Image (cartoon, grey):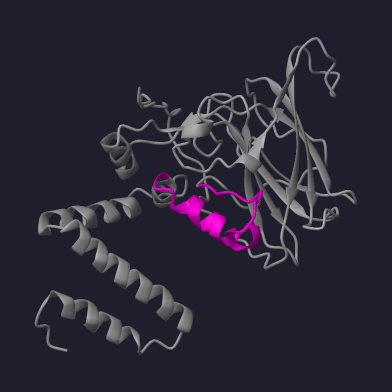
Amino acid sequence: MIIKNQQDVTTAVLAELEHATDERFKTIMKAAVIHLHGFARDAQLTEAEFHQVCGVIAQLGQLTTPSHNEVVLAAGSMGLSSLVCLLNNGDNGQSETTANLMGPFWRQDAPRMASGASLVRSLTAGVPIFVNAWVRDRQGQPVADADVDVWHTSAEGFYENQDPEQADMNLRGKFTTDAQGHIAFQSVKPAGYPIPLSGPVGALLRAQSRHNMRPAHIHFMINKPGYKTQFSQVYSSDDPFLETDVQFAVTQALIGHYVLHTNTPAPDPQVEGDWYSLDYTFVIEPGENRLPKPPITGKAEGGKPVNVVLPARA
């Protein structure tokens, strides 16, 4: 088609998409073209701004490494990751769900561990925490023999893949639910943390005068044939950034009650002083138990990173 005006461009691209044989691909691409072309028109995008956008997209890929995924970080910081999750869980967005973001820090092949074991694999400061979790189906019945991956930050706010000083797979593990759908583990209470600011995501946040903090949380990934693979994050009820999470991911269903115990014996007699407990129940849905591609595959090299925190708006 010979282009006569700006509207012809959209018409021509949509016409070419009609030749696609994969109907789902056609649906996605048609929606993408309509909305992208509409975005350019609505924003009255200049040529200079268009080239700037292309540069940002290129930089997202260039900054994605085996230990850092800038693309996933950007999607979360614009609320897209949270939206896609809620559209696809809880009866396709119709009801509350314990599903949440995968996040950019899940690593495959975490060590398999016995229920009750400690995730701590190297010297890791922090207040001990004892977690009990249950997995149930939508009818409230326990789900046995489900694999549950667990991972979280240290009390300094670093995942092990970010921090060369932590042992490989520190604060990560894989458990199997028992007949009651239960797992248990010991660790240290995670800290909230700032997301990295060195790339386009940092520029995006600064332009909006937004802080870059995530509230403290523990990640879970539940996987069993016959059920949809569920990623979850259980957020600490005492965290000051619950309502302003930079990734827009905190839902009411995922705020866990992290209970501080003082002057009370811990479940592990070797633990002295204060400790936390967390009890939480996940509800998983029937569906495909397909694992996604891990967003990271290895550890960062070099020195210990330095967290940079943007101020919150007054």
Residue 211 higher or lower than 109, as above or below: above
Nearer to me, 90 or 297:
90
Instruction: Please give the range of residues in magenta.
Output: 77-103
Image position, residue 41 (x, y; %): 19, 64
Residue 197 higher or lower than 70, as above or below: above
Image position, residue 227 (x, y; %): 73, 63
Q: Is residue 308 left or right of residue 208?
A: right
Nearer to me, 140 or 62:
140
- The picture quadrant where one finds residue 259 is top right
Report the quarter where the C terminus lies.
Answer: top left
Image position, residue 177 (x, y; %): 82, 49
Q: Seen from this angle, which residue lies furthest top?
A: 263
Which residue is rendered at x = 55% and y = 35% of the image? 159
Residue 203 shows in this picture: yes
Q: Seen from this angle, which residue lies furthest right?
A: 179
Is residue 226 located in the magenta-colored stretch of the structure? Answer: no
Nearer to me, 234 or 131:
234
Report the quarter where the N terminus lies.
Answer: bottom left
Residue 214 shows in this picture: no
Q: Is residue 183 left or right of residue 103?
A: right
